[in-house]
Image: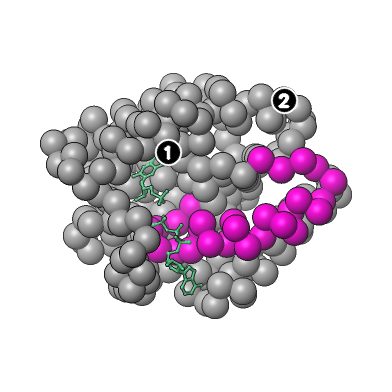
Amino acid sequence: MNGILITLEGPDGAGKTSVLKNILPELEKMKQEVVATREPGGVRIAEEIRQIILSTENREIDSKTELMLFAAARRLHMQEKMLPALREGKLVIVDRFIDSSVAYQGYGRGLGVEVVNWLNEFATDGLKPDLTLYFDIDTDLALARIMKNRSEEVNRLDLERAEMHRKVRQGYLEIVAKEPERFVKIDASQSLEKVATDALTAIKERFNSKF
Ligand SMILES: Nc1ncnc2c1ncn2[C@@H]1O[C@H](COP(=O)(O)OP(=O)(O)OP(=O)(O)O)[C@@H](O)[C@H]1O
Ligand SMILES: Cc1cn([C@H]2C[C@H](O)[C@@H](COP(=O)(O)O)O2)c(=O)[nH]c1=O
């Protein structure tokens, strides 16, 4: 595969989706064709699974079911959209991927890193991002952003207690520390403009010769 896979990771409210929207026009000016997508979702059935997982009505979904639903959505999305684009040499940029399951289900829900890594490997046949931008933010600030903009989608996981969100952030920090060559950590508490500039700079620095 001669494409490039970039993933965006971070706690809820870190600003990943806003940054992606902001930097997309600049990325599209580069040589490589760009596919911007998201997890869970990105293709029809995975979007349907997204509705099921994130609906605030679906309180019966326990942690293990949640983990497996994310993994099923991940495989569908990867097979149908990500791999064909990567094989065609495109730049694929995904809002959340394997690290979200490790941070949320592994650390946040307490299922443990080992089982989540195993399931990620099974679902993706070992596909790893070339670069992951980790948007780091203090939990209270992130939750304040979500609550300030409640008119936007607030999902089942957004509504989890602050304690779970703190575990997720701590989990991310541990994941980043374990694979420093894959991750670039970005201070997401800055203005949107500055966060977007930092994200674009990180991408250009890593792949400049390829674009
Ligand atoms: N740098 C920023 N400063 C202040 N507010 C921001 C910033 N970035 C994003 N926001 C606002 O914070 C909220 C969450 O942003 P966004 O949806 O982009 O985050 P996210 O990381 O994709 O979150 P989630 O994973 O929960 O979808 C939005 O209302 C957005 O307008
Ligand atoms: C892929 C993935 C996601 N999650 C969580 C993280 C968020 O709370 C939601 C997705 O909502 P967003 O607005 O698109 O960020 O799902 C998770 O717990 N595990 C995963 O693998």
Span shown in magenta = 9-35
Q: Where's residue 35, x and y in %? A: 66, 40
* Amino acid marked by disc 1: Pro
Q: Nearer the viewer, residue 45 or 199?
A: 45
Q: Quadrant of residue 74?
A: top left
Q: Earlier in the sequence, mark 2 or mark 1?
A: 1
Task: Please state if 106 lies on the left or on the right of 123 as rendered.
Answer: left
Residue 89 shows in the view: yes
Q: Is residue 119 magenta?
A: no
| Tag 1 secondary structure | loop
Reply above or below: 105 against 44: below
Q: Say which mark, if any, is on residue 186.
A: none
Q: Is residue 17 magenta?
A: yes
Q: Say which mark, if any, is on residue 40.
A: 1
Q: Quadrant of residue 168?
A: bottom left
Reply above or below: 192 against 19: below
Residue at the limit of the structure toward the left, as seen here: 60
Q: Where's residue 44, x and y in %? A: 47, 28
The residue where tag 2 is placed is 87
Residue 139 shows in the view: no
Residue at image position (67%, 55%) is: 24
